């Protein structure tokens, strides 16, 4: 019987070569987040299963208070924000290259506070937050981010 010369296709999780009796496992890594000093990001995330992340105005205040603490800890500068019932948009500038650490603290802390307040547990947000780099040298990306946030 001829040997299989097939290689695992990109995106496959498991490839078993029955001719060689070898087990090959291929993992697709997440895209790394780019962090720059002085970068401006349009950040967004939505509720798990598109459920609300705010039940009332006190939750919005809790979110903004937690966001303010995250900005103080990480020295972020806020350019704009928009809170919808099941998602949010933020435009922040990071003087230090610390987006990942700051967002990890912010989303984890808000989730814990929300869950404790409402006697819940588990995920509040759906997967990873989305971050788009906003190029400050041009105005088109700024316009698009501002249009979304309005």
Image (cartoon, rainbow, N blue to C red):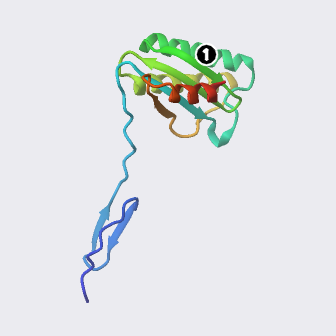
**Residue count near mark 1 (Cα–Cα under 10 Å), binned few <14, some 14–19, many ≥20:** some
Question: Where does the image place residue 146, in percent across and percent down from the top left?
Answer: 60, 24
> Can you say which quadrant of the picture contains the N terminus?
bottom left
Residue visible at 44% across and 27% down? Answer: 135
Which is nearer the eye, 141 or 80?
A: 141
Question: Where does the image place residue 72, in percent across and percent down from the top left?
Answer: 47, 10
Q: Does residue 111 appear in this view?
A: no
86 up-or-down from 72: above or below: below
> Can you say which quadrant of the picture contains the C terminus?
top right
Residue visible at 52% across and 29% down? Answer: 140
Which is nearer the eye, 48 or 138?
A: 138
Secondary element at tag 1 = helix
Question: Where does the image place residue 30, in percent across and percent down from the top left?
Answer: 40, 44
- Side (left or right) of 144 relative to 54: left
Which residue does the numbered mark 1 point to in the structure image? 64
Residue visible at 30% across and 67% down? Answer: 23
61 up-or-down from 28: above or below: above
- Side (left or right) of 66 relative to 39: right
Q: Does residue 102 appear in this view?
A: yes
Question: Where does the image place residue 48, in percent across and percent down from the top left?
Answer: 62, 39
Residue farthest right in this picture: 56
């Amino acid at each position: 019987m001829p040997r299989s010369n097939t290689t695992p296709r990109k995106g496959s999780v498991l490839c078993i070569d029955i001719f060689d009796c070898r087990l090959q496992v291929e993992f697709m890594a997440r895209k790394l987040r780019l962090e720059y000093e002085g970068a401006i990001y349009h950040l967004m995330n939505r509720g798990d299963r598109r459920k609300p992340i705010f039940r009332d105005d006190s939750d919005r205040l809790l979110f903004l208070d937690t966001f303010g603490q995250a900005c103080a800890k990480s020295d972020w500068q806020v350019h704009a924000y928009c809170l919808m019932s099941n998602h949010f948009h933020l435009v922040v500038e990071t003087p230090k290259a610390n987006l990942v650490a700051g967002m990890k603290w912010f989303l984890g802390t808000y989730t814990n506070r929300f869950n404790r307040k409402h006697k819940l547990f588990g995920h509040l947000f759906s997967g990873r937050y989305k971050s788009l780099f906003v190029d400050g040298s041009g105005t088109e990306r700024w316009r698009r981010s501002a249009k979304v946030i309005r």
